[in-house]
Each structure stands twice: as structure tokens, then as C-alpha cells.
Image (cartoon, rainbow, N blue to C red):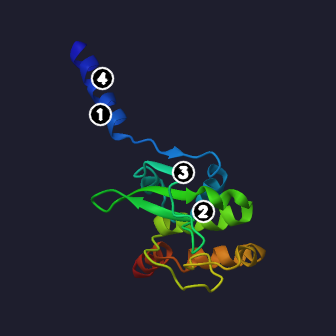
Amino acid sequence: MKKLLLLGILVSSFFSMSAQSVSIDGRLQPLLNEFFELCKTYEIEYYDKLFQLESIDVVNTLTVSEKGSTLGMLRRNAQGNVVAIDINWMAQLDPEILKVVAFHEFAHYFLEYSKHVCDDCGRIMSVVNSSYFNIIRDWDAKVKTLFESSPAYLKKEQVGATN
């Protein structure tokens, strides 16, 4: 009985040590939930990737200047692995800007966009968006393009086509 109890303690200790928790800023949680619902719709896995992160957070550490500001970025560790999704506090000034910036950063990580698709072309994955509000006005079409053009979706479709 003692051996069984000891084994149980060791197994539970292993799982609690290997399970990582992710700190998610409550202001981003509804947007993340919406994004994950779309991942489910497009059958894109996200769960394992989520728990490789330390945080998804609104921060005040990103560049802010009159020449340009960084509204979001993936933060990496010394080995180059993504450990956090950071959203600049300035993106909160308008809920529509926050939504576009959050989806942009979520897509870099969960949809595997390693680079932007254009400089300023009115797509969520543009380097710059001179009008976030135009994107929001056509949100459903922009999100469809975001997901269906994503490396994660295209990879999934290729695997499905070969089976």
C-alpha cells in the first residue's frame, strides 16, 4: 500500500511540474476566446501551443514614439522560442484597434505567420494598418482571409489532401 501511495505521489508531482500555466491578461481573454473558437472552426490546433507560453499580456514595455510605435510582438527567450505575446497598452485606446492588434499577434503565433503579408494593404497581417477601422468594417472577410491564408491552415490542408 505504501508503494502504491508513493507511486501516486510521484506521478502527480511529475504532472504538476510538467504542466505549465499561462498568465493571460483579462482584457485579452475575450479576444483570445474568440480567436480559439475560430481555430476550432478551421480545425487548427492551438491547445499545446498555448501552454508553451508564459504569458499573453498588455504591457508598457514596447516602443512608443512619434516616428512609430510597436503595438504588439512575440517575445522570445535566449533559445529563440516564443514565450509571450505582448500587446502595447496603447492598443487599448480603442477596442477595434485592440481587436486587430490582438488577432495579428495571435496569428503570428497560433497560425504560424512568420512574416507579414504586405506593408499596408488593409489585411490583418500587414506590417502597418493605416486604417484599423476599414479592417473592422469588413471583419468577417478579413478573418476568413487571415485563417485560410495562414501557414497553419495551408499545412493542414496539404496533409488532408495527401491522405
Under mark 1, the amino acid is: Phe
- What residue lies at 33% left-to-right and 40% top-to-bottom? 18
Asked whether residue 41 appears in the rendered view, the answer is no
Q: Position of residue 130 (x, y in %)?
A: 67, 80
Residue density around tag 4, few if under 14, some if 14–19, many if 20 or more, within 10 Å = few
The amino acid at mark 2 is Ala
Please name the residue that numbered disc 2 is placed on. Answer: 102
Q: Does residue 10 appear left or right of residue 134 in this picture? A: left
Q: Are marks 4 and 2 in contact (CB under 8 Å)?
A: no
Residue bearing mark 3 = 57
Q: Mark 4 = which residue?
A: 9
- Gap in Å between the C-alphas at discs 2 and 3? 10 Å
Q: CA distance from mark 4 to mark 2?
A: 40 Å
- Residues packed near mark 1 inside 10 Å, few (<14), some (14 to 19) or many (20 plus): few
Pointer 1 and pointer 3: residues touching (CB < 8 Å)? no
> Residue 14: which numbered mark, if any?
1
Q: Is residue 50 above or below residue 6?
A: below
Q: Residue at x 49, y 69 (%)?
A: 108
Q: Amino acid at mark 3?
A: Asp
Q: Nearer the viewer, residue 133 or 155?
A: 133
Which class describes the residues within 10 Å of circle 3: few (<14), some (14-19), or many (20+)?
A: many
Q: Is residue 135 visible?
A: yes
